[in-house]
Image: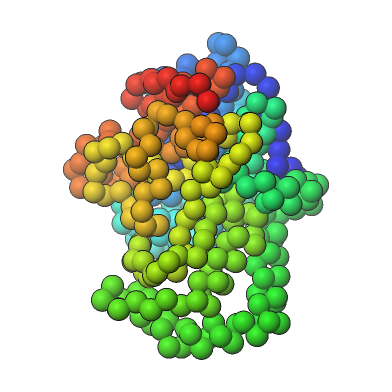
Amino acid sequence: MQLIGTLFDGPLDIVGDIHGEIDALNALLAHLGYDERGDHPDGRRLVFVGDLVDRGPDSPAVLNQVRALVEAGHAQCIIGNHELNLLRDDEKHGNSWWTAPDKETEHPMQKITRSAKAELTRWLETLPLALEREDLRVVHACWNDASVELLRELNGPDWHIADLYADYQRELYEKMAELRFMNQVKKEWAQFGPRLADPDWDAQFMPFKAELDRRSQMDNPISVLTSGEEETADAPFWAGGRWRMVSRVKWWERYDADIPVVFGHYWRRFKDASIVLSDKYGPDLIEGVEPHHWMGKRNNVYCVDFSVGARAGQRAANEDELVCSLAAVRWPEAEVVHDDGRRFSLEAP
Ligand SMILES: [Mn+2]
């Protein structure tokens, strides 16, 4: 399979993270001009940046719809960190509809059946981790040249992303065990591990845990592309219910290539974004960047994830759901279209 694939030719509509919000997807596709079969009168085609699932009410419907669009040749789709969790059957907050369908969920959610799960797993295994062409790159979280290069060299028929991910993790742990590093991690864990989920802990920096966490992310190119670059934090910080020793990197401030990148993942928000938005990863990395401006060192990088994944929480809290939205970037027009029909021009990259 193509881990790094080739983007369709012609005009594209690149859709941000959907997170199970099937109504938002249908509304957005209608505003973009697609009919119910996914045909567009101007021959446009869709690209999905991943994170189709979790948090919203109907992840199976979104998967089925995107799969049908892909199989009909109307769309391409790449893997996000949430699809990676599904492929690994790794239970995380918001994905029990897939990993543990008998469990009660925080918000109402359509569950997956056993047979649909097997079939959708086979489909997800066919999806690439990034797409590229001469004038554009699309990835879920981060375009990192070294990681893309490693994966591009592996393009071939036999890969399963979940197996490849497990290989990278195993290699790292073997390397760290040889260096007797894991003994240090264990010692540190015995001393401080139980406090990591205690907000009242006078948090100590844990250098061995920090290094293991950093390398688990950065030595695995699948992790880099699907959830971004990370670095050792200056001090422990509290986010998403635990103390963390590594923090996310604004990789776009280092991105120095001519080719623009469109990606999702980072839960960008409008200025007055509501309180239910996740604090899972700590600070908002896109704070201060206008919602419809290019960003980064070369002003040619754009995040199209407008946090529609927070809508389930907003519904439950009776908040204005339109603070968060689903959006798409039209290319080459460089226009952003939201699921309520609002349109904004990006400046030239
Ligand atoms: Mn993501």
Relative image position of residue 213 (x, y in whole percent): 53, 68
Residue in front for this viewpoint, 38 or 82: 82
Residue in front for this viewpoint, 339 or 269: 269
Q: Image point 65% across, 26% down: which residue?
A: 135
If the image is split into quadrants, where does the N terminus sit? top right
Determine whether 178 is above or below 298 in the image.
below
Determine whether 282 is above or below 38 in the image.
below
Determine whether 88 is above or below 343 in the image.
below
Relative image position of residue 249 (x, y in whole percent): 49, 53
Determine whether 183 is above or below 275 in the image.
below
Residue in front for this viewpoint, 291 or 343: 291
Please state if 315 lies on the left or on the right of 15 as rendered: left
Image quadrant where residue 238 sits: bottom left
State the scheme by which the image is colored: rainbow
Q: Image point 33% across, 55% down: which residue?
A: 279
Relative image position of residue 268 (x, y in whole percent): 38, 41
Q: Image point 44% across, 45% down: which residue?
A: 266
